Image (cartoon, rainbow, N blue to C red):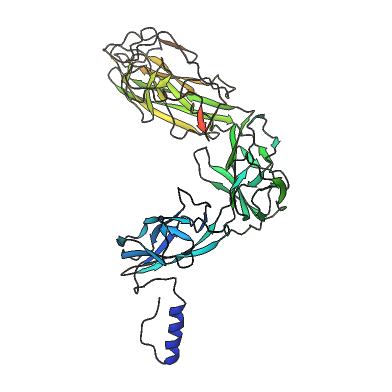
Amino acid sequence: MINRRRRAGAVLTAVAAVVAAWLPATSAQAADGPVVHIEMQQDKIALPMPPSLDPPQLSWLFHNDGPGVAKDVTISIDLSDVKSWLTVNGKPADDVYTGSPIAEVPEGDYAGGIVDINPKPDTPLGTTGTVIMKGTSSNGTVVSTPVELTVGSAELTVNKLANRKGDKPGTTIETPVTISNTGSVAADGVQLKVLTTRGLAYADRFSNCAYSTVPADPYGGPSEQALCTFDTVVEPGKSYRLDQPLDLKVTQQALYEFVRREALPLSGAKAPSGSGPKLSLVAAGAADTSGTEVGRQYVLADNSADMAAGGDTAEGAPGDLVHVDVSLSNEGPARMDNNVSDDQPALLFTVPTGTRAVEIPKRCSVWLPDVKAGSGEQTPGEPQYVCHPQETGFEVGDTRTFRFGLEIREGAGTTTGAAKATTAYDSTLEFDDNQANNTAPVTVEVEDADGATPSPTPSPAATGDDGNDVKTQTVTDATVTGTLASTGSSSALPVAGAVGAGALLIGGALVFFVRRRKA
C-alpha cells in the first residue's frame, strides 16, 4: 500500500516517485480497501492461423480478497503491444479495450467477462505479444495480470492403443507413448498427463514425473496421475516417443480399468526433481496423423468381484409398520467400478407376501419385469423394487444399504421375500464367480393373537385391493419361487428404456465389455 502521508525531504519524494513508476500493473488503490484479482482461464493463448470463425477468447473471473465489497469495478485491457496484428470482437484492436463497469464485486469469486481475439490474416506464424489485464475500483485495488499471445499453435496428439482383456492380477502391461505435433508451431516442452484407475499401478517411478491421486472424473475414479515434464522442443510435423515403456502393474483389485493419456504444451511448469531414472522423449519420425488428443485404453482384467445381497428380519403384529434393511456389498477380491456400461450394480427387492411396502428409499423405484428396468416411480404397494446406489463404484468391503418400511396386513403369517444382487437391467453378474450369496432372505415374523410368533409357512392371501397379493409365494434357500402378483404397471417409461443395456457412449464410440441383456 502506498504511504500517502506527507514525506519529509526531497529524497523521500524522489523515492516515492520511483515506487509509483514501478507499479504500473496495479490500478488505482484505496487505502485499506478490498483487493480484487483478475483470474484468467488461460495466461498463454495460441491463436490459429488462418483466423478462426470460432475465435479464442480472453476469459476472466474476479476474486475479491476483501475486506468488503469492491465498488465500481472496470476492466481495461492494454493492447498496445499487439494492436498492430490483433482483432478484438472482430474489429482492429485499439490501444486499450475498456469493459462495462460493474457496480459491486462481493468477496470471493465473481463472474468476469469474455473478449474474442484473432490475429489479422497476414500475421506471420510465431508472432508473439503480451496484453495486460488491468482494472480500477472506486474503493479498492484491482491487481493486473499479463496474458501471452502467440500466432499459430502446437497441436499435440498421442498414439491410440487397443483395449485389453484377460490380463491377470500380478502381471505387467506396457503402455508405449508417442507424441505428435500436427500443429503449425513448435511446442517448447511438453507435459504428459497419464491417469489410471486404481486397479492399475505405476511399475516404475521417474524423476521428472509427479505422482498424485486426483478426484473422480466422468470415466470413474478417483484416479492415479503421473504428470511428466519434458523440456524437449517438439517440432511441427514430427513425432517423439518415450525412451522406455510406461509399465503398469495389474493389481489384485483390478477388474474394469482404464488408462488415459494426454500431451500438453509446456506452460511454464518446471520438471519435478524426484527420485528414479529420468524419462525422455526421442525423435520418432513424421507426425502420426491418426493420433488422438486424449487416448483412452480400457483394460478388463481376468478377475472377479463377489457382489453379495444382504437380507434382514423384522417382527410385528398385523397392522404394524416394520422396517427391513436390505443391502448390496462387494466382498472382492476386485473393486467394482464398471466404466464401460450403464448396466451398473443394483439390488432387486421382492416384498414379503402379506406385507405392503409403504416407505420406499430415495434411490429405489418400482421394478417393471416386462422391460427389466425400474420405472423411476416410488409407488407404494408394489411387489418388487430395484435400488440403484448413488455411488456405483464399490471398493472391496463397501456396502450400500436401503431401508424399506413394510405394513403387515391383517391375516398375514410369518413371511419371507428376498434381496437379490443384480444389475440395473437384472443381467447376470458375469464378473461374479460366487453366485451363492447373490440372494438373501428378507423375513417378517408375524405374531399371532396371543403374541406368539409361529414358524414360517407359506403366506395366506393378503387382504386389500393392491399391493403384494401373492397367494402361493414361498422362499427356499433364499430363492423366490411361486407366482408373483401383477405389478400395477405405471405408464412411466423405464429409467433406462431409451439406452441399450450394457452399452455406453464413450469418446464417440460404443464400447462393450459386458453382455447386453436380450430384448
Residue appearing at x 37%, y 58% in the figure = 108
| Rendering coords of residue 286 (x, y %) | 69, 45
Query: How many numbered marks does the figure carry?
Result: 0
Residue appearing at x 26%, y 12% in the figure = 465
Q: Quadrant of residue 249?
A: top right
| Rendering coords of residue 277 (x, y %) | 73, 52
Q: Quadrant of residue 327?
A: top left
Q: Residue most toward the front?
A: 122
Observer-nearest residue: 255 or 339? Answer: 339
Q: Is residue 131 above or below residue 385?
A: below
Q: Is residue 497 above or below residue 140?
A: above
Residue appearing at x 29%, y 17% in the figure = 318
Is 436 displayed left or right of 282 in the figure?
Answer: left
| Rendering coords of residue 438 (x, y %) | 51, 21
Is 410 displayed left or right of 421 in the figure?
Answer: left
Observer-nearest residue: 272 or 148? Answer: 148
Residue 198 seen? no
| Rendering coords of residue 352 (x, y %) | 38, 16
Q: Is residue 50 above or below residue 414?
A: below
Q: In the rendered view of the protein, which quadrant contains the N terminus?
A: bottom left
Observer-nearest residue: 147 or 106? Answer: 147
Q: Quadrant of residue 91?
A: bottom left
Residue 476 seen? yes
Observer-nearest residue: 345 or 325? Answer: 345
